[in-house]
Image (spheres, rainbow, N blue to C red):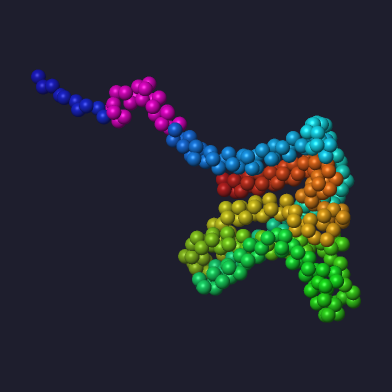
């Protein structure tokens, strides 16, 4: 009679008797839990810093928005909760619907469209340049991006100044105007200058981001489409744009957030600090009510409304993109 000798089982292998037992399953579950928790442990310091710098101030703003919070409360440290009265006052204010919200939404839509369009055109131009000229062009546009918003705003204020501005001098020299025009008193010309300022400052980010994506688009597909007779517009919308859909999603979402909460470019212009009520947007209105009128609770409610608008727009846009990907 022949006896077959089995080799000893290797611990942790599928042949180990303990591998399929309760102890093996517990060790496997613990290892899986440790592996899942490791990324969060590595991110924990950064998340704690972000929570301290961003989450806690946001919570405080929300708490202030439910209070009648002013200088008296700052000095005494008392709280005066009034529920949703600040939100009711803000939403029932006719200026919100006739001035503030249209200024915010219409300007943001125009700024995002112009910024993305100009940035994409510049990216297409740079992608067709050689390495040397691409570096020169990239360095030149990065100067506009690196310029602080305060500095850029004062430059555009000087350009459109009613008395000594270059624009008025050129228009009067060309015989198009008989006398200087104050561009900052009119609501439309005021935001036209803000639009130029914001687009000038924001398009380099779009250009550099889109150009980085363009370098990854298949050259063979573009050349094949060109040989088949496809024009530049058709090649862009049927090959380039679908390949860069995620890139455009990022730049559009970020541009929307930045342009909805634009503040310095409006506040620093003549009349933008609240003296000209027809040019208020949500960001400046919140600041004026908080620090100009010492109504910090009411100003916080306006800031929360602005944040909610941004969240709704971002969620809607992301859902639309996800549905297109599913199709």
Q: Is residue 102 above or below residue 144?
A: above
- Specify the farthest residue to the front: 75
Residue occupying image coordinates x 77% and y 37%: 64
Residue at point 78% right, 63% down? Answer: 192
x and y, in percent, of residue 312 in the image:
70, 43
Instruction: Estimate the x, y position of residue 60 in percent, counting from the top left.
Output: 72, 37
How far from the left and from the top, in percent, is residue 175?
86, 80
Instruction: Using residue 143 as the reference point, say whether residue 272 is left or right of it.
Output: right
What's the magenta region?
A: 11-33
Residue 28 forms part of the magenta stretch:
yes
Q: x%, y% of residue 205?
A: 62, 60
Q: Quarter of the image containing the N terminus? A: top left
Which quadrant of the figure has residue 50? top right
Determine the residue located farthest toward the top in the rendered image. Answer: 1
- Magenta stretch containing residue 6, yes or no? no
Judge whether 226 appears above or below 250 on screen. below
Q: Is residue 152 visible?
A: yes
Of residues 243 and 34, the one drawn nearer to the viewer in this rendering: 34
Residue 188 visible at all: no
Quarter-wise, where is residue 51 in the image? top right
Judged left or right of residue 2, residue 70 is right
Residue beneath the point at 59% across and 46% down: 322
Number of dots carrying numbers: 0
Front in this rendered view, residue 298 or 116: 298
Residue at the right extreme? Answer: 178
Identify the residue at horizontal 84%, vertical 66% (top origin).
183
């Amino acid at each position: 009679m022949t006896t077959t000798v089995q080799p000893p089982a290797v611990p942790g292998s599928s042949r180990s008797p303990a591998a399929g037992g309760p102890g093996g399953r517990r060790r496997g579950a613990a290892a899986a839990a440790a592996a899942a928790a490791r990324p969060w442990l590595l991110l924990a310091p950064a998340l704690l810093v972000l929570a301290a710098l961003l989450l806690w101030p946001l919570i405080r703003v929300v708490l202030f928005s439910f209070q009648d919070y002013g200088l008296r409360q700052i000095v005494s440290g008392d709280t005066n909760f009034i529920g949703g009265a600040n939100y009711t006052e803000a939403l029932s204010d006719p200026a919100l619907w006739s001035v503030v919200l249209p200024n915010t939404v219409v300007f943001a839509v125009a700024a995002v469209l112009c910024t993305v369009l100009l940035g994409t055109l510049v990216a297409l131009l740079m992608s067709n340049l050689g390495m040397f000229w691409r570096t020169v062009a990239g360095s030149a546009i990065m100067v506009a991006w690196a310029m602080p918003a305060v500095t850029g705003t004062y430059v555009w204020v000087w350009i459109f100044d009613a008395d000594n501005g270059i624009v008025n001098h050129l228009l009067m020299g060309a015989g198009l105007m008989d006398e200087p025009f104050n561009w900052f008193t009119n609501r439309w010309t005021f935001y036209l200058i803000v639009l130029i300022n914001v687009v000038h400052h924001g398009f380099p980010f779009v250009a550099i981001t889109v150009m980085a994506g363009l370098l990854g688009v298949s050259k063979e597909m573009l050349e094949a489409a060109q040989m088949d007779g496809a024009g530049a517009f058709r090649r862009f919308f049927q090959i380039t744009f679908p390949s860069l859909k995620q890139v455009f999603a990022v730049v559009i979402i970020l541009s929307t957030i930045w342009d909805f909460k634009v503040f310095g470019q409006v506040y620093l212009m003549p009349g933008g600090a609240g003296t000209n009520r027809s040019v208020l947007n949500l960001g400046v209105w919140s600041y004026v009510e908080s620090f100009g009128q010492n109504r910090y609770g009411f100003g916080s409610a306006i800031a929360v409304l602005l944040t909610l608008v941004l969240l709704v727009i971002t969620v809607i846009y992301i859902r639309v993109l996800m549905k297109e990907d599913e199709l």
